[in-house]
Amino acid sequence: MTAASKAPSTGSTAPIVYIVDDDNGMRTSLAWLLESVGVKSEGFANAAQFLQAFDANVPACLVLDVRMPETSGFDVQGELNRRGATLPIIFVSGQGDIPMSVRALQNGAIDFVEKPYNSQQMLERIQRAMKLAAQRHASDQKHRELRQRIESLTAREKEVLRGVLDGKGSKRIASDLSISVKTVDVHRASIKDKLGASSIATLVRDVMAVWSPGEDVHHER
């Protein structure tokens, strides 16, 4: 990538880059650097401001300072993990060490950069994070849509779906639910149609990514 590279195309809106750092100079310089290559960013001086503004429905990546007053970068990471957020995080620190970087990466960060950082290398890291952010956002959207479709199933269809996910055939499901095999097959066809699955194998693969047979359908991962 050259300094003239632009933000990657995601098919819709390019991911935004959140910058959370109590150092005003660092926030400003990074925002200017990103703007120079057409990347949109939003800066926050502390964790509270960022967490209040953060929208999980918007594709984004995060450049996050480790050491900040009141709430540290690790605290922010922990809160995002509790919210189930999947945005890629690049930690930055002026006093980084190996244990600190290991902790960040073990908790899901994709990178750890020591200040002062090389501008070109930082751009490349952020571009990679933006590409990953777009991929994760698309996957999250697909999962949210599938969960909504599962919630639209009738109670009986959910029972049949649980049987399908358990690997049971129509005869076994019919016996378990005290209904006819023909009725089970009707429900299976309806489930495939409502969930937009091309085959039972595809249905099982996609549904198991967001819902397990024993869980309540309203449970959010």
Image: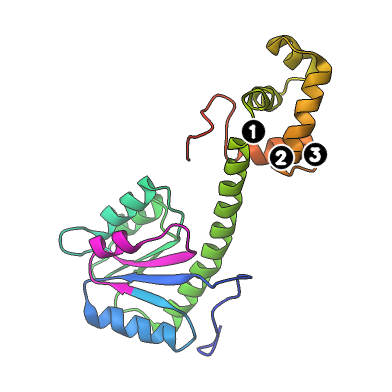
Q: Nearer the viewer, mark 3 or mark 2?
A: 2
Q: Which residue is mark 2?
A: 194
Q: Is residue 215 above or below residue 15?
A: above
- Residue 103 seen in render: no
- The residue furthest left is 70
Residue drawn at 55 percent across, 84 percent down: 6
Report crowding for label 1: few under 14, some 14 to 19, many 20 or more residues within 10 A (C-alpha). Answer: some
Q: Earlier in the sequence, mark 1 or mark 2?
A: 1
| Residue 69: quadrant of the picture | bottom left
In three-dimensional space, the C-alpha distance between marks 3 and 2, rounded to whole angstroms, equals 12 Å
Q: Is residue 145 left or right of residue 126?
A: right
Where disc 2 sits, the SS reads helix
Residue drawn at 69 percent across, 39 percent down: 205
Q: Position of residue 41 (x, y in %)?
A: 40, 76
Q: The disc labelled 3 sits on which kind of residue?
A: Ser
Q: The disc labelled 1 sits on which kind of residue?
A: Leu
Q: Earlier in the sequence, mark 3 or mark 1?
A: 1
Q: Which residue is mark 1?
A: 153
Badge 1 vs badge 2, beta-carbon distance below 8 Å: yes
Q: Is residue 12 left or right of residue 163?
A: left
Report crowding for label 2: few under 14, some 14 to 19, many 20 or more residues within 10 A (C-alpha). Answer: some
Q: Tell me the magenta residue range.
A: 43-65
Q: Is residue 190 above or below residue 116?
A: above
Q: Which residue is mark 3?
A: 199
Q: Nearer the viewer, residue 188 or 213?
A: 188
In three-dimensional space, the C-alpha distance between marks 3 and 1, rounded to whole angstroms, equals 17 Å
Q: Is residue 162 magenta?
A: no
Where disc 1 sits, the SS reads loop
Q: Is residue 38 left or right of residue 160?
A: left
Q: Nearer the viewer, mark 3 or mark 1?
A: 1
